Image (tube, rainbow, N blue to C red):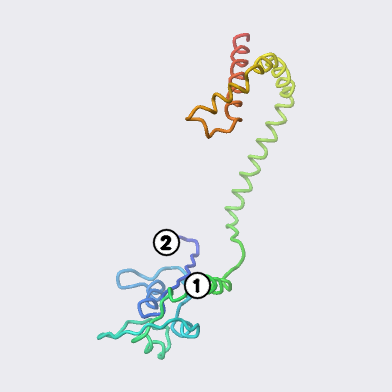
Amino acid sequence: MGKSKEPLTFFCIHDADGPGTKIYEALQEGTSARRGRDVRIVNLGLDPQEAQAMHLEVETFQRQSKVPVASYLSNEEKEWLQKHRIELNAMDTPTFVTWLDSKLRSHHNGKVIPPVDVLMRRLRNTIQETLKEGIRIRLLEQAGFSDHVRLALQSIDPDIAAQMPGLSDRIAAVLNDKDKQKEHWVKPLDRVAEQLVRDFLSRSSRNN
């Protein structure tokens, strides 16, 4: 993704501890094994000063070696992180969601609108599909499509009427089948309709 020509923005959240602050710094500046990314990284926190102001639970610890911390922090925060940390999970879920929403609100620029080439491609495709549908309807009307359907239905009417005796019982028998008990009554009825249409088209094809 970092090789994309499109500008990329990442939002980073982390614990208020040394390793957490280094996550943001490594994402932005790169490491000895990987160059910095050509993207914008937005640090949403959680940083020590804010975490303390929120009165979240503070964990204390002792380490023999110095805790690595990010260079963007104040001297006071760097010193505090040598013996303290506050994790994101110190917030309960409602507090965390409210906190995250407040962080993202200032970065909200409305709904994303694609680049103009994407807009133009979509516009052309939509016009093409709309034209196809409009021209299809016009050609069908010119060919007397509605009249053909009406005459075909009249031809099938005797077959439809022949289905009336025992139709309900046949549908009930299908629905009582253990493999089809979850079917809606419409499905077996539609299968009857499809078979009648296939029979009509087959007869028409032979007659032509």
Q: Amino acid at mark 1?
A: Phe
Q: Which residue is mark 1?
A: 96
Question: What is the residue that sits farthest to the left in this orientation?
Answer: 64
Which residue is pictured at 40% across the width and 90% down the height? 75
Q: Nearer the viewer, residue 79 or 42?
A: 79
C-alpha span from label 2 to label 1: 32 Å
Quadrant the C terminus occupies: top right
Which residue is pictured at 62% across the width and 23% down the height? 168
Give the number of the disc on residue 119: none
- Determine whether 185 is above or below 9 in the image: above
Q: Which residue is mark 2?
A: 3
**Marked residue nearer the N-terminal end (2 or 1):** 2
Which residue is pictured at 63% across the width and 13% down the height? 204
Residue 73 in the image: state x and y as whole percent: 42, 85
Which residue is pictured at 61% across the width and 61% down the height? 111
Q: Amino acid at mark 2?
A: Lys
